[in-house]
Image (tube, rainbow, N blue to C red):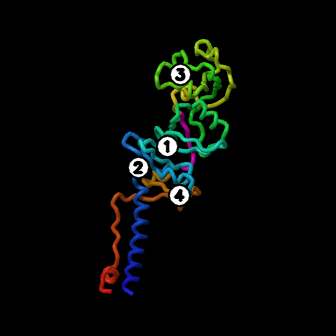
């Protein structure tokens, strides 16, 4: 009898600890490393293996690599695409991402032909970008002012090159690169050249909660709504009635 009672008390204690731990986690800003972006609502760091599980809204699930990089997986009509998260501006609701393969022009074309809600391109420009296929050049870099760094896009592993539609192909060293097509877009070609793309999200917004001095969390760990809550920095103590404690440790 005492053994069953002890088991019941231990189960109750575990439930309380888990509940308390979940509430406490909502108050902590986490990160993958000291040089990495701070992660808070609506984002959450999860295990990479849980990306396909419904433990958190998938669009806002981030994970850490072994070398402490922050990653996000965007769902597109061509399949999932991985990006490195370089910065998160919570006030402007803009997330900055880069391609771990340093082939952002190719990844951009995948995103541009897909829906990847709740995100959209964060730039507000309105222009036209030309894309060229430089696979026949077989040089690591083109001879133009944007390809002087060793960190520049590798034209052997990533032969798709992007330019402003008005740029001269001779100046850009694109004479031997056939033009693929033009794309009307709100992003700037400098973003593709620097391997840094900005995406914005409009919902959810925590502005109303923060205006009240509160924080946000998902309702029941789903993306169907948010709720405001006060974050108590002091960890709450879990107290059990003394008779239950004595019963649990008493003689069997």
Dots 4, 2 in contact, CB < 8 A: no
Q: Is residue 86 above or below residue 235?
A: above
Which contiguous range is marked in magenta?
A: 197-205
Dots 2, 1 in contact, CB < 8 A: no
* Residue 98 makes an appearance in the image: no
Dots 4, 1 in contact, CB < 8 A: no
Q: Position of residue 63 (x, y in %)?
A: 48, 48
What mark, if any, has residue 19 been given in the picture? Answer: none
Q: Nearer the viewer, residue 57 or 106?
A: 106
Please tell me in which quadrant of the rendered image residue 68 appears. top left
Q: Does dot 2 land on a helix, a strand or a loop?
A: loop
The residue at the point 60 percent across, 44 percent down is: 80
Q: Which residue is mark 2?
A: 30
Q: Which residue is mark 1?
A: 71
Is 202 inside the magenta-drawn segment?
Answer: yes
The residue at the point 63 percent across, 20 percent down is: 136
Q: Nearer the viewer, mark 4 or mark 2?
A: 4
Q: Earlier in the sequence, mark 4 or mark 1?
A: 4
Q: Nearer the viewer, mark 3 or mark 4?
A: 3
Q: CA distance from mark 3 to mark 1?
A: 27 Å
What mark, if any, has residue 140 been given in the picture? Answer: 3
Q: Which residue is mark 4?
A: 55
Q: Does dot 4 land on a helix, a strand or a loop?
A: loop
């Amino acid at each position: 009898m005492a053994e069953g009672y002890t088991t019941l008390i231990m189960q109750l204690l575990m439930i309380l600890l888990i509940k308390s731990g979940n509430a406490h986690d909502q108050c902590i800003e986490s990160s993958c490393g000291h040089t990495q972006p701070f992660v808070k609502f609506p984002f959450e760091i999860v295990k990479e293996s849980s990306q396909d599980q419904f433990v958190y809204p998938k669009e806002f699930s981030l994970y850490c690599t072994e070398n402490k990089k922050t990653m996000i997986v965007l769902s597109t009509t061509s399949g999932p695409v991985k990006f490195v998260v370089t910065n998160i501006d919570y006030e402007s609701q803009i997330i900055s991402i880069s391609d771990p393969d340093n082939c952002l022009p190719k990844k951009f074309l995948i995103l541009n032909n897909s829906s990847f809600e709740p995100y959209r391109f964060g730039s507000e420009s309105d222009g036209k970008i030309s894309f060229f296929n430089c696979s026949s050049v077989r040089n690591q870099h083109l001879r133009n002012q944007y390809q002087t760094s060793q960190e520049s896009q590798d034209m052997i592993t990533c032969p798709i090159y992007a330019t402003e539609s008005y740029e001269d192909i001779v100046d850009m060293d694109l004479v031997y690169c056939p033009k693929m097509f033009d794309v009307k877009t709100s992003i700037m070609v400098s973003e593709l050249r620097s391997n840094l793309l900005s995406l914005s999200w409009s919902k959810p917004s925590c502005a109303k909660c923060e205006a009240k001095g509160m924080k946000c969390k998902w309702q029941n760990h789903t993306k169907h709504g948010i709720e405001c809550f006060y974050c108590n920095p002091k960890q709450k103590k879990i107290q059990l009635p003394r008779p239950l404690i004595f019963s649990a440790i008493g003689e069997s």
